[in-house]
Image (cartoon, helix red, strand yellow):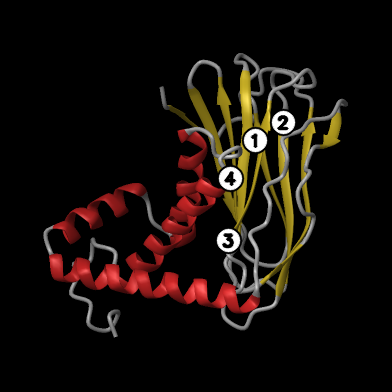
């Protein structure tokens, strides 16, 4: 009903879409609070927020502009907040009925070798609306096995999926910059996302997320999840094209 009666301007995210977005952001905050080790700094949380925006097909500018409009239109804002609460309560009720539990985040670890799979989380997940979190996250901290210019390839295969899979990879450097990249699949396929570390910088943390939100009644799987690290041979300037760099401190 809210969607049909929405009076928001074209440049503003409608009440129903905004409520769904805000519900996912609140759930993201819950993931951060329950997994402080993996989300221990602001840059990791920013990547999580970025993946939520990508899921909904919006940008930070879209959200900021919309929130500014809602701030000047209190009735629409209250309607949107009420709908957000309804969405969250429905998700909580469904998770409790199903007895769902949040997946544990993979432990931070690394291995020696020129090409190794450093993924330590679940290899396969059955998707459904009863899953408390739509995100699978990981976080790796630097150790003796790291090298400058390393390449990380995150892979996942969708099976019977009905919505896109969004993958995010990011790296924090000791100079205060963060480099990130994301990919959105278009169907059942083996999806891969490559992040190439800057060989001129010292990396401190590599982290990321896999996001998939199942539709009602859907039974699908995320399978063959891996994170393969290979050694870089040069500065990798060409290979790093398309990666985004930001500074957080």
What residue is rendered at 41% in x and 22% in y? 249
What x and y, as percent, mark residue 137? 63, 47
Q: Which label's residue is closer to the chain start, 4 or 1?
A: 4
Upstream in sequence: badge 1 or badge 2? 2
Question: Between marks 1 and 2, how big is the CA–CA gap?
Answer: 6 Å
Could you classify mark 1 by the number of other residues whose Cα lies within 10 Å: few (under 14), some (14-19), or many (20 or more)? many
Q: CA distance from mark 3 to mark 1?
A: 24 Å
> Between tags 2 and 4, which lies in front?
4
Question: Dot 2 corresponds to which residue?
Answer: 151
Q: Residue at x 49, y 59 (%)?
A: 55
- Given the current orientation, which residue lies at the most extreme left position? 72
**Disc number at residue 118?**
none
Q: Which residue is mark 3?
A: 133
Query: Which one is in front in this view, the residue at disc 2 or the one at disc 3?
Result: 3
Residue 228 visible: yes
Residue tagged by mark 4? 35
Q: Earlier in the sequence, mark 2 or mark 4?
A: 4
Locate residue 42, reporting x and y percent. Answer: 46, 34
Quick check: 39 above or below 81? above
Q: Residue at x 61, y 42 (%)?
A: 208
Packing grade of label 2 (10 A; few <14, some 14-19, many >=20) is: many
Which mark's residue is nearer the viewer, 4 or 1? 4
Instruction: Identify the mark at residue 195; answer none if there is no mark.
Output: 1
Q: CA distance from mark 2 to mark 3?
A: 28 Å
Does residue 243 appear in this view?
Answer: no
Instruction: Report the front residue among 225 and 230.
Output: 225
Q: Position of residue 196 (x, y in %)?
A: 66, 30
User: On the rendered image, what quadrant is the N terminus found in?
Assistant: bottom left
């Amino acid at each position: 009903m809210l969607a049909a009666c929405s009076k928001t301007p074209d440049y503003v995210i409608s009440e129903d879409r905004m409520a769904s977005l805000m519900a996912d952001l609140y759930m993201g905050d819950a993931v951060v609070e329950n997994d402080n080790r993996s989300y221990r700094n602001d840059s990791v949380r920013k990547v999580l927020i970025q993946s939520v925006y990508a899921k909904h097909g919006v940008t930070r500018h879209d959200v900021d502009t919309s929130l500014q409009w809602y701030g000047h239109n209190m009735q629409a804002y209250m309607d949107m907040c009420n709908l957000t609460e309804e969405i969250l309560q429905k998700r909580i009720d469904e998770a409790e009925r199903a007895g769902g539990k949040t997946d544990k985040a993979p432990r931070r670890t690394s291995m020696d070798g020129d090409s190794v799979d450093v993924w330590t989380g679940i290899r396969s997940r059955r998707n459904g609306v009863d899953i408390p979190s739509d995100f699978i996250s990981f976080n790796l901290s630097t150790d003796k096995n790291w090298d400058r210019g390393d390449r990380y390839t995150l892979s996942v295969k969708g099976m019977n999926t009905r919505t896109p899979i969004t993958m995010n990879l990011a790296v924090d450097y000791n100079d205060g910059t963060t480099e990130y990249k994301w990919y959105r699949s278009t169907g059942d396929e083996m999806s891969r996302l490559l992040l190439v570390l800057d060989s001129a910088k010292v990396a401190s943390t590599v982290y990321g997320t896999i996001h998939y939100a199942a539709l009602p009644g859907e039974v699908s799987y995320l399978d063959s999840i891996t994170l393969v690290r290979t050694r870089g041979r040069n500065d990798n300037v060409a290979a790093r094209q398309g990666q985004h760099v930001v500074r957080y401190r």
